[in-house]
Image (cartoon, helix red, strand yellow):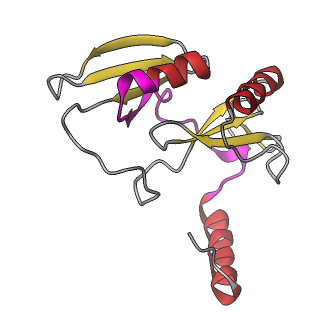
C-alpha cells in the first residue's frame, strides 16, 4: 500500500492532530468504558487443524474449546486462551471457498498480543528456529514482532503491559 507523500502527508497529519484535539481527552477526564472487555475475537481460518497446531503447539496458546458452529452445520468454532481471560476464536467453513487474506476496510490489520520480556525472547527464538519471517524487534519496532499466521492474519507480539502504549498509560 503506497504511503502518502508531500502535501497529502501534511494533510493526513493535520487531520490526525485535529482529531486528537477534538476527541482525545486527558486520562483524568476520561470516563469508564461502558463494557467489561473483549470476550473473544472471532476470525475465519482455512484449516482448523493447521490453525490449532500454529496457535497451540507453536505459539503456546492453549485450545480451550472446540464445538460446532451454531450458524453453519459442519463448521468448527474453537477458542484459544490468550491470557487475562481473553479468547481468540476461529471458525472454519468446510466446502466454502474464501479468498486469501487482503488488507481492506473492515478487515483485521493485525492483532497485538501483550507478552512479557521472557515470553518475547522465547517467541523470537521459536520464530527464528522455525524460519518464520517477521518484522522487528530491531527495525523501529523495539518492543514488537510482526508476522502472519497460516491464514494470513497479522499478529504482533508486543513487549509491553496491557493498557500501556510506548510506556504511557492509556486506560485507568
Q: Is residue 159 above or below residue 61?
A: below
The quadrant in which residue 39 appears is top left
In the image, residue 145 lies at what x, y percent? 72, 40
In the image, residue 43 lies at what x, y percent? 39, 36
Can you say which quadrant of the picture contains the C terminus? Answer: top right
| Residue 28 painted magenta | yes
- Residue drawn at 17 percent across, 22 percent down: 74
Can you say which quadrant of the picture contains the N terminus? Answer: bottom right
| Residue 33 painted magenta | yes
The quadrant in which residue 31 appears is top right
Front residue of 70 and 50: 50
Front residue of 57 and 81: 57
Q: Is residue 140 above or below residue 160?
A: below
Front residue of 41 and 26: 41
Q: Can residue 146 be seen in this snapshot? A: yes
Front residue of 121 and 87: 121
Q: Can residue 85 be seen in this snapshot? A: no
Span colored in magenta: 24-51
- In the displayed structure image, the side of residue 34 where residue 69 appears, left or right: left
Extreme residue toward the bottom, this view: 7
- In the displayed structure image, the side of residue 140 where residue 1 appears, left or right: left
- Residue drawn at 72 percent across, 50 percent down: 26
Extreme residue toward the left, this view: 73
Task: Please tell me how many numbered marks the rendered image carries.
Answer: 0
- In the displayed structure image, the side of residue 69 where residue 2 appears, left or right: right
- Residue drawn at 23 percent across, 25 percent down: 75
In the image, residue 104 lies at what x, y percent? 43, 60
In the image, residue 61 lies at what x, y percent? 56, 18
- Residue drawn at 70 percent across, 87 percent down: 6
Amino acid at each position: 500500500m503506497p504511503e502518502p507523500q508531500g502535501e497529502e502527508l501534511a494533510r493526513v497529519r493535520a487531520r490526525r492532530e485535529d482529531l486528537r484535539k477534538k476527541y482525545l481527552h486527558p486520562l483524568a477526564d476520561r470516563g469508564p468504558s461502558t463494557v467489561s472487555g473483549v470476550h473473544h475475537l472471532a476470525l475465519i481460518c482455512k484449516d482448523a487443524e493447521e490453525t490449532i497446531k500454529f496457535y497451540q503447539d507453536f505459539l503456546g496458546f492453549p485450545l480451550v474449546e472446540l464445538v460446532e458452529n451454531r450458524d453453519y452445520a459442519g463448521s468448527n468454532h474453537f477458542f484459544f486462551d490468550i491470557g487475562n481471560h481473553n479468547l481468540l476464536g476461529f471458525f472454519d467453513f468446510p466446502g466454502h471457498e474464501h479468498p486469501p487474506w487482503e488488507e481492506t476496510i473492515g478487515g483485521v490489520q493485525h492483532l497485538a498480543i501483550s507478552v512479557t520480556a521472557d515470553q518475547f525472547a522465547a517467541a523470537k527464538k521459536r520464530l527464528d528456529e522455525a524460519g518464520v519471517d517477521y518484522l522487528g524487534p530491531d527495525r523501529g519496532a523495539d518492543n514488537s514482532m510482526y508476522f502472519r499466521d497460516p491464514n494470513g492474519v497479522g499478529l504482533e507480539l508486543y513487549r509491553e503491559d496491557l493498557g500501556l502504549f510506548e510506556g504511557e498509560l492509556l486506560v485507568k
